[in-house]
Image: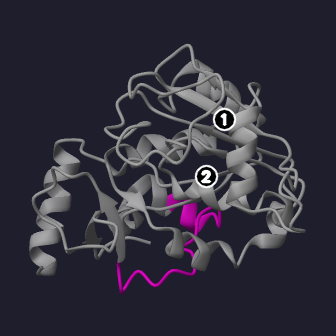
Amino acid sequence: MKTKSLNKNLHKASQAKKDEFYTQLVDIENELKHYKDQFRGKVVYCNCDDPFESNFFKYFAANFNALGLKKLITTSYVKSPIVGGQLPLFEVEGLKPSGKEPFKIEIKEVPDTDGDGAVNIDDVEYLLKHDRNTATSLRGNGDFRSKECIELLKEANIVVTNPPFSLFREYVAQLVEYEKKFLIIGNTNSLTYKEIFKLIKEDKFRTGYTNFNVGMFFVVPDDWEHFHHIDKSGKKIARVSTSC
């Protein structure tokens, strides 16, 4: 599909506040490998992520011990079209998402439950299936601007996620207000926003290692009409050329 059509689609999505762009695990791995030492002993918060779908959650949960994390917090948003529904990762003890209820997952340790000498997503799955304290329902809707999520934000050292493109200014403003370190995906056009450009000049904001001249591919919901291709698992993939 031509870049012009995809950019037009992105513009329409922004106008309609349709922000369901889900990051591929390979892109997360390629970017995060440059920061591994900076996560040791830190609380990481993914505040725009349905844990049952988010590859950010899968990456940090599976690499919890290797990164030396202190805690991983992930919160889901009630309006997500795929919360616990379209691509569920696993069933959770004491919390079986109906697709309507927002929740949080807090991981403080990931034991090697299968005794294979390494911690991976299988150990995370076992943890979520057997530890009722890991996943709990949220009182609110899971919006990053809610009081409940702001309290979790205060606890975090680093925020890592793919925030809603349509709320990018507001999202970054919140991170700056609470003086949080962050690694987030954004549209390259946001570099021209006066609020963002000011942060760049103050050396508080910089682009990552991902080449934004190439663009990125994202998983999109089934009802998207404009997409690049369908992957081996049947998911629709869209290319956004202005992402980094």
Work out whether residue 18 can be spotted. yes
Instruction: Name the residue: 16% across, 55% down.
Output: 224
Q: Are marks 1 and 2 in contact (CB under 8 Å)?
A: yes
Q: Position of residue 50 (x, y in %)?
A: 49, 41
Tell which of 97 and 227 is nearer to you: 97
Quarter of the image with the C terminus is bottom left
Mark 2: few/some/many CA within 10 Å (<14, 14-19, 20+)? many
Question: In the figure, 92 relative to 237: above or below?
Answer: above
Quadrant in the rendering for residue 99: top left
Q: Is residue 73 left or right of residue 240?
A: right
Q: Position of residue 152 (x, y in %)?
A: 69, 30
Q: Mark 1 — residue? A: 105
Instruction: Name the residue: 41% across, 25% down.
Output: 98
Q: Is residue 176 left or right of residue 76?
A: right
Q: CA distance from mark 1 to mark 2?
A: 9 Å
Badge 2 amino acid? Phe
Quadrant in the rendering for residue 128: top right
Q: Is residue 84 left or right of residue 57?
A: left
Q: Mark 2 — residue? A: 57
Q: Position of residue 141 (x, y in %)?
A: 46, 21
Q: Which residues are magenta?
A: 198-215
Badge 1 amino acid? Ile
Q: How many marks?
A: 2
Instruction: Name the residue: 50% across, 28% down.
Output: 145
SS category of the residue bearing label 1: strand
Quarter of the image with the N terminus is bottom left
Mark 1: few/some/many CA within 10 Å (<14, 14-19, 20+)? many
Question: In the figure, 3 relative to 137: above or below?
Answer: below
